Image (cartoon, rainbow, N blue to C red):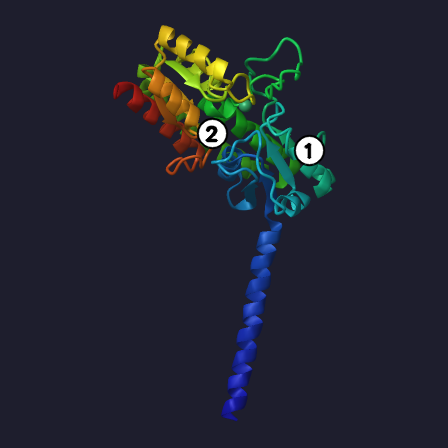
């Protein structure tokens, strides 16, 4: 009798367990599945969608966003996604289109409501007069690194909130409320950053890749060259010789690199009076830069520290 009761208890316990598991499963299944190309977009989507969304970024913050190593796990993620959020301007062109083909998810193909290109409302800079890839330029539609200017953080948040609201109008009110909170948070930071960045005005920089242009424009830095010959083209010995001359002439202060090797930045620093500085170009690129706001803050703080320190 005792044993029987114990068995009954186990049965009840098991049924309860399964029902809890099923309910949790249902909650997960009801979440809107968003895949983003870079972690900045994932962080911002989470701020707007909160518990209504599950978000995953394909790229990791430490990778080079033009050439993200494609992992097999990307395919099922894209296959099941309700929305795909991307930077656009051909930033992802070398790795995303082939994946979209394999993932066969018509909801997130270009032109469909689930395909969210965050560049559409950005004021794009460095747009070439002619569309020309002959020199291997990987910025054929203008500079795609607008995520490094926090004012564009607001634009990205608005685009994402708009897309979520259009696709899931039943939650529109929540998305718009969360957007408002996030925008006011950014609005509190933006003037503070502007003040913090005052010592950066007129500072001459040499980025490894041409990705600090929006940041430089916002805070008044001057770019005197890049370590790469052109976006996506590694430096040649001649280019380095010319760059060293230019950096000496212009008194360049900082060489900024991110996911690239520090070989050329160190070489340039040893031949000039500039400092080599590693900075995240995406959320998660450095420890302590794990949200969009923290990344911008990290970049300004570290750059100001480097300029003041020498
Ligand atoms: Zn680029």
- In the depicted structure, whether residue 224 falls above or below residue 46: above
Q: Which residue is mark 1?
A: 97
Q: Which is more toward the observer, 249 or 56?
A: 249
- In the depicted structure, whether residue 197 falls above or below residue 179: above
Identify which residue is drawn at 59% across, 13% down.
127
Q: Is residue 279 visible?
A: yes
Judging from the image, what secondary structure is the residue with disc 2 in? loop
Spot occupied by residue 102 in the image (x, y as percentages of width and height):
72, 41
Spot occupied by residue 51 in the image (x, y as percentages of width and height):
52, 46
Q: Is residue 168 visible?
A: no
Spot occupied by residue 29 in the image (x, y as percentages of width and height):
62, 52
Q: Quadrant of residue 67?
A: top right
- In the depicted structure, whether residue 116 falls above or below residue 227: below
Spot occupied by residue 60 in the image (x, y as percentages of width and height):
51, 38
Q: Residue furthest left?
A: 309
Q: Quadrant of residue 270?
A: top left
Q: Quadrant of ligand 1?
A: top right
């Amino acid at each position: 009798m005792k044993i029987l009761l114990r068995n009954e208890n186990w049965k009840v316990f098991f049924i309860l367990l399964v029902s809890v598991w099923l309910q949790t499963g249902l909650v997960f299944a009801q979440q809107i599945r968003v895949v983003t190309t870079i972690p900045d977009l994932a962080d911002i989507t989470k701020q707007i969608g909160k518990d209504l969304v599950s978000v995953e970024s394909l790229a990791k913050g430490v990778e080079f966003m033009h050439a993200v190593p494609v992992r097999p796990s990307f395919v099922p993620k894209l296959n099941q996604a309700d929305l795909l959020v991307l930077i656009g301007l051909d930033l992802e062109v070398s790795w995303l289109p082939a994946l979209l083909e394999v993932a066969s998810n018509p909801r997130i193909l270009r032109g469909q409501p689930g395909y969210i290109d965050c560049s559409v409302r950005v004021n794009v800079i460095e747009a070439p007069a002619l569309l020309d890839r002959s020199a291997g330029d990987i910025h054929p539609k203008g500079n795609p690194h607008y995520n490094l200017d926090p004012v564009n953080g607001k634009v990205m948040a608005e685009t994402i909130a708009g897309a979520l609201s259009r696709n899931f109008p039943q939650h529109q009110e929540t998305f718009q409320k969360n957007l408002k909170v996030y925008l006011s948070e950014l609005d509190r930071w933006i003037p503070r950053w502007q003040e913090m960045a005052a010592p950066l005005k007129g500072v001459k920089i040499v980025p490894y890749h041409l990705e600090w242009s929006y940041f430089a424009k916002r805070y008044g830095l001057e770019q005197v060259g890049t370590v790469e010959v052109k976006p996506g083209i590694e430096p040649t010995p001649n280019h380095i010789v010319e760059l060293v001359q230019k950096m000496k002439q212009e008194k360049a202060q900082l060489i900024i690199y991110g996911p690239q090797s520090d070989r050329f930045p160190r070489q340039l620093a040893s031949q000039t009076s500039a400092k080599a500085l590693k900075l995240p170009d995406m959320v998660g690129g450095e420890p302590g830069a794990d949200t969009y706001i923290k990344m911008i803050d990290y970049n300004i703080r570290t750059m100001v520290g480097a300029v003041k320190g020498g």
